[in-house]
Image (cartoon, rainbow, N blue to C red):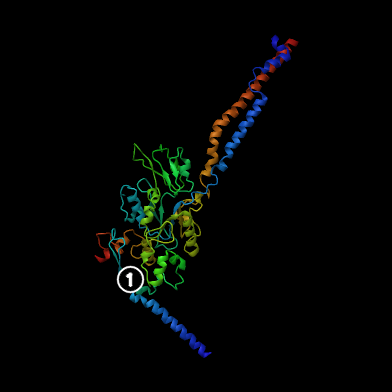
Amino acid sequence: MGKSQNPDEHNGEKKTPRTITRRCFLGAVGALGTTALIGTGSKASAAGNFEGWPNRFGVLTDLTACVGCRSCEKACNEVNNLPSPKVPFDDKSVFNEARRPNENAYTIVNQYANPKDKDKPIYRKLQCNHCEEPACANSCPIHAYNKTPEGAVLYREDFCFGCRYCMAACPFNVPAFNYWSALEPKIMKCTMCYPRIKNGGIPGCVEACPAGALTFGKRDLLLKLAAEKIAKNPDKYVDHIYGEREAGGTSWIYISGVPFGELGFPTNLPNKPLAEETKGFLGAVPVVLTVWPALFGMCYAALRHRDEIEKEKSANEKKEEVTHE
Amino acid sequence: MKRGLVLFFAITLSLFFAVSLYAGSSGKAPDVVSLDTMKDKYEAVPFTHKKHADMISDCGKCHHQHGNNAADPCKDCHAVTPSVFKQSVTAGFLPCRNCHTSPNPQKPHLVSLKVAYHSKCFECHWGMGNIGTDPKGCTELCHAIKGTKLSSSK
């Protein structure tokens, strides 16, 4: 009691238990705030100015040329040693339903009605589009995906632990999971025949195509070729190269006689890498997890400390009143 | 004035004859060509060249030709290799396979021999029979799988 009667003594005593000084607190808040800002600001420059590997390959699909012979499917099956299909490759009954690439077929051909000429159906080949900035690779927590300088997006099964985020992230529904393999399931998808192109070859499907629907080459040459084809035949093609910019660009690009939306192509994709959409959020996660607890913890400590001081003060005042009385 | 008119008709007529002679040069062309570049997988295709040539009566529909406005720019063929240029100047006709080889990633404009053949066939035959609507159509109508026969020749 006697101790706190003297206001000078009271102030002196207050200083000793104070672990957070005003200067220290403001300094820490400033530093943490700056760190937080740097953390979120980094998203803009994370992609950098990298414009892609200069000599990367691609495939141009001319959807007006495909006759639905399924030679590509057959060649893909042989090149990748995939199990033989239940329905043979020369059976057109597969066109009755829309299919998607799966663990037994890295590429498939679907049939669509042709609004221009109903006797000539349109065939669309589906496979991995080998995006310029693949969403699968960005979604993968442990970098089991790899964009090679040749353009192919490759999956490494020895890294994968089976979270299947890539399947959810792919805007084209490409990565497939072999659920039937209970012990060592893995993601399966087109590799752009990477071992072949690495040795100067061309993908199996492109080699097999008799109709000229598939052209393999340097992506920048293919873009020029596609633009030339459209310019020469403005009545034959719609003025759009699908995959030039969609989802930040894909290695597999397409030209078509009818709008791509009518052939099941996703038309709601932004013209920037899908990673840009999530980078801000994902970049903020480490900052939120590390800086926020410290920042708010300090705020909480400061507020609690102030309350304690006020409580003490009011108690002292009461005591003082009592002693005065 | 009358003279000028006669001269005009004379020139037009001579031009007409020249063109028909040019088109008629298919007479020298082979009758049936056996297309067997894929003989490891398919039976050779007996392509009735003369029949097709007589029917279309325009070589330019299938072959690159000089004086054909629809043809590619000169450099597209003549710049392929200097030897090809020399050959195409000295020889009247070049086999398709001289330029149309296996696909070359460096020259995506230059289609492979297989594509060059097929794309010409499909120009007319797409939709004929089952071609382009049934994967079986090709092996039933044009080239039988090795060891089998065309359904039409059974």
- Regarding residue A16, the answer to whether it shows in the image is yes
Q: What's the amino acid at mark 1? A: His
Is residue A34 shown above or below A84?
above
Q: State the image coordinates of residue B25 (x, y, percent, origin top left).
A: 36, 76
Q: State the image coordinates of residue A150 (x, y, percent, origin top left).
A: 44, 49
In which image quadrant can residue A19 be found?
Answer: top right
In front of the other: B116 or A74: B116
B39 with respect to A132 (left or right): left
Q: Residue at 64% x, 17% y: name it.
A: A17
Is residue A195 shown above or below A120?
above
In front of the other: A60 or B140: A60
Q: Residue at 39% x, 46% y: name it.
A: A189
A302 with respect to B71 (left or right): right
A91 with respect to A156 (left or right): left
Q: Residues within 10 Å of mark 1 (few under 14, many from 20)?
A: some
In which image quadrant can residue A161 be found?
Answer: top left
Chain ID of residue with mark 1: B
Q: State the image coordinates of residue A11 (x, y, percent, origin top left).
A: 71, 17
Q: State the image coordinates of residue B18 (x, y, percent, origin top left).
A: 42, 80
Q: Which residue is mark 1?
A: B49
